[in-house]
């Protein structure tokens, strides 16, 4: 039941973390739309799960917990949409970081 779901969630968190470790050098070595959109998804998911743990640890009570979780989903959706918009209509995540490093 919930033990298996928690185990699968933990495994998913580790998989996304390992994926991010692989995407960072990929962003430098072969930047492009596939890496940009993969970074957008992985960074958003990683942040969503991390902030979800903060809510679990520090927000108590039924109503505040529900409000915080709705806010988290809105924030995560806006983050992903914003990164996708940036990838599609601007230089993309990989190129933007390269431009920052070249300053």
Image: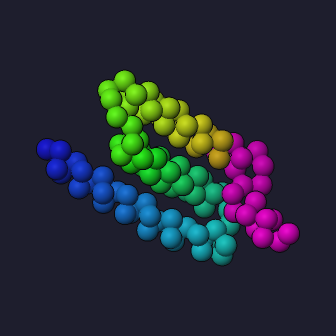
* In-front residue for pair 53/85: 53
Q: Is residue 32 visible?
A: yes
The span shown in magenta is 84-103
Query: What is the x, y in percent for residue 80?
Result: 58, 43
* Residue at figure coordinates x 50%, y 32% from the top left: 71
* Residue at figure coordinates x 66%, y 41% from the top left: 82
* Residue at figure coordinates x 43%, y 60% from the top left: 16
Q: Quadrant of residue 2?
A: top left
* Residue at figure coordinates x 42%, y 34% from the top left: 69
Q: Quadrant of residue 60?
A: top left
Query: What is the x, y in percent for residue 21?
Result: 50, 70
Q: Quadrant of the C terminus?
A: bottom right
Q: Establish if 77 lies above or below 21.
A: above
Q: Is residue 34 visible?
A: no
* In-front residue for pair 76/37: 76
Query: What is the x, y in percent for residue 96?
Result: 76, 60
Magenta span contains residue 12: no
Query: What is the x, y in percent for residue 51?
Result: 46, 47
Q: Establish if 60 lies above or below 51.
A: above
Q: Quadrant of the N terminus?
A: top left
Q: Establish if 24 lies above or below 92.
A: below
Most extreme residue toward the left, as rendered?
A: 1
Most extreme residue toward the right, as rendered?
A: 103
Q: Main secondary structure of the magenta part?
A: helix
Q: Is residue 93 left or right of residue 46?
A: right
Count of marks placed on residues: 0
Q: Is residue 84 left or right of residue 41?
A: right
């Amino acid at each position: 039941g919930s033990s298996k779901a928690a185990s699968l969630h933990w495994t998913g968190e580790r998989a996304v973390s390992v994926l991010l470790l692989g995407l960072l050098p990929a962003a430098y070595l072969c930047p492009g739309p596939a890496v940009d959109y993969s970074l957008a998804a992985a960074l958003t998911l990683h942040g969503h799960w991390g902030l979800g743990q903060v809510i679990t640890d520090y927000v108590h009570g039924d109503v505040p917990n529900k409000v915080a979780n709705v806010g988290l989903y809105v924030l995560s959706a806006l983050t992903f949409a914003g990164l996708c918009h940036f990838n599609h209509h601007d230089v993309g995540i990989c190129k933007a970081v390269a431009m920052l490093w070249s300053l």
